[in-house]
Image (spheres, rainbow, N blue to C red):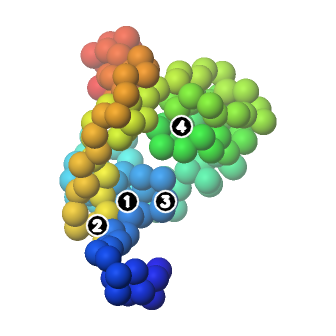
Amino acid sequence: MCKAIVAINQVTRCAALPLGGQEGDRTASQVAAWISGFPTRVGYLQGFPEYDPYHYGAERLLLEGEADLLVWVSTLSTNPPPETQVPTLVIGRSGMVFSKEPEVFIPVGVPGIDFSGHMYRCDNVVALPLYQLRDGGLPKASNVLKAIEEAMGPESS
């Protein structure tokens, strides 16, 4: 990529901005660190954040049936959640195809297409703004999650 940019700059102006290719993992990690002071794989069972990558590893929890529910939030990709025997709630972009239909699927809009937002660059330093390009009529994933939390009542918080 760098060599291509150098070659293109011989005749015009060109630059590259590296973005994380992990479907928002960098942004999720930034948010987890901002909220708790820890990377992902944090539990809140004690009423405070507890970092434990083994006990809070999603793959292990699902494989061993230690989870009551898999909540899969995917607004950037149409990749489906992992297959599991655990009941599954998917809050994801429209167009997802499932080999095993989830118990609940709520289609939502895509940040940077259906509404504005931000995403972190691959070096975890710069937040990049995302702008709304269309009005697809789908809700934001955050609004869906807030509605679920409100419907569960104050004892769920």
Residue 113: x %, y % from top left: 39, 36
Label 3 vs label 4, nearer the camera: 3
Pick whichever, 113 or 120, lies toward us: 113
Q: Residue at x 52, y 24 (%)?
A: 107
Q: Earlier in the sequence, mark 1 or mark 4?
A: 1
* Residue 151, image quadrant: top left
| Among numbered discs 1 and 2, the one appearing first in the sequence | 1
Q: Is residue 8 visible?
A: yes
Spatial CA span between label 1 and label 3: 7 Å
Task: Name the residue carrying label 1.
Answer: 26
Neighbor class of circle 3 (other Cα within 10 Å; few <14, some 14-19, many 20+) is: few
Judging by the rendered image, the residue that carries numbered circle 4 is 72
Q: CA distance from mark 3 to mark 4?
A: 15 Å
User: For the residue labelled by badge 2, is the local secondary structure a helix, a strand or a loop?
Assistant: loop
Of badges 4 and 2, the one in the foreground is 2
Q: CA distance from mark 1 to mark 2?
A: 7 Å
Label pair 1/3, CB-CB below 8 angstroms = yes
Quadrant position of residue 104: top right
Secondary element at image label 3 = loop
* Up/down of 139 relative to 63, above or below: above
- What kind of residue is marked 4? Trp
Q: Position of residue 25 (x, y in %)?
A: 43, 56
Q: Can you give x and y, in whole percent of width and height, for residue 92 in the image?
A: 52, 32
Residue at 48 percent across and 43 percent down: it is 76
* Residue under label 2: 124
Q: Quick one: which residue is furthest to the front in this view?
A: 11
Query: Circle 1 sits in a helix, a strand or a loop, which is it?
Result: helix
3D distance between C-alphas at marks 4 and 2: 23 Å
